[in-house]
Image (cartoon, helix red, strand yellow):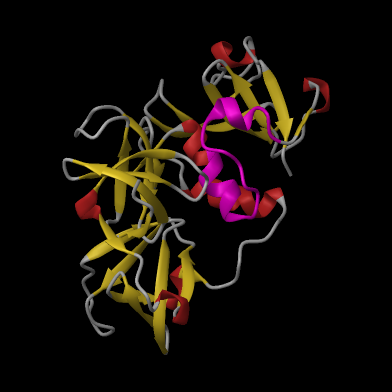
Amino acid sequence: MVNKWHIVANTVTDMWLRPKFESGRVSQAVCGQILREVRHKAGFSYCYSEDNYAGWVRKSHLINLPQDIGKLRCAHIKTYLADIFSLSSARTCHSRLSYGSAVFCDKIAGNMIHLKYPDGWARKSDVIFRKKSLTSFNVILKDLKKFLGTPYLWGGKSAFGIDCSGLVQLVYNFHGYDLPRDSRDQAEFGRRVARKNILPGDLIFSPGHVCIHLGHETILHANAQNGLVNIESLDKQSSQYRADIAENITMIRRVL
């Protein structure tokens, strides 16, 4: 069995159910994410991500974990999308990286940082160097709102397309709460609370779905029905009422 370590070289790469393009997306990995390959077949690598989630990834989207990576400063993209430039003085970007992507820096020059992996320059204001740490829901909410209007994508986990559990995992994990990938597993995380005791930041589960409670019966979620991330309501009096969620809540979990 192969046991190799790679980092994702593409902006985002799909993790497939089988080693075949469009066999069924199970998740995604963003640039800089470390993956462990255990076997390969027909140009695909079967990899485990840092959260132990597995799928087949295009081998061409990966590079072997560089030997010098431990000597570089690791940062994470904190903006919704960050421009990557070929030169520090360039005005036009050649690519964009999603929130949560990892970059490995070898030099800081004024308000720009030089990236060795992936190669290029990024604005210092677009990244964060400190390790993720537990924080308040108000801080988390600011990042969740960055995703409003993002297209819904089954298995998606980036600013280019995202699903309900991917949104929850991506943003909460960025702030130090290591949630699993799927909603069924997220429903086992934290502690159960009654609906009458619900607070902002609690996760609300209905069959096959998870959303974030914002307070006053409002929810934010990656919405397959409307095809984007938006804010809706569990209040019958609201024009944004979602009866299918409000009337089928299976679990509420507090993870903060």
The outermost residue toward the right is 197
Work out whether residue 232 can be spotted.
no
Against 167, is 23 above or below? Answer: above
Residue 63, quarter of picture = bottom left
The structure residue drawn at horizontal position 29% and vertical position 56%, both measured from the top left corner, is: 11
Which residue is rendered at x = 32% and y = 66% of the image? 83
Instruction: Locate the C terminus and report the quarter of the image it occupies.
Output: top right
* Residue 3 coordinates in the image, percent (x, y): 38, 53
Q: Residue furthest front?
A: 1
Residue 40, given in percent of the width and then of the height, sits at 26, 44
- The stretch in magenta equals 168-189
Is residue 130 something one can see in this rendering? Answer: yes
Q: Nearer the viewer, residue 4 or 30?
A: 4
Residue 176 in the magenta stretch? The answer is: yes
Relative to 85, 241 lies left or right? right
**Image height check: is 67 above or below 196?**
below
Q: Nearer the viewer, residue 68 or 211?
A: 68
Q: Quadrant of residue 215?
A: top right
Judged left or right of residue 41, residue 205 is right
Q: Nearer the viewer, residue 110 or 208?
A: 208
Residue 129 falls inside the magenta stretch: no
Q: Residue furthest left?
A: 42
Q: Position of residue 17 (x, y in %)?
A: 32, 30
The percent position of residue 72, horizontal first and vertical second, equals 44, 80
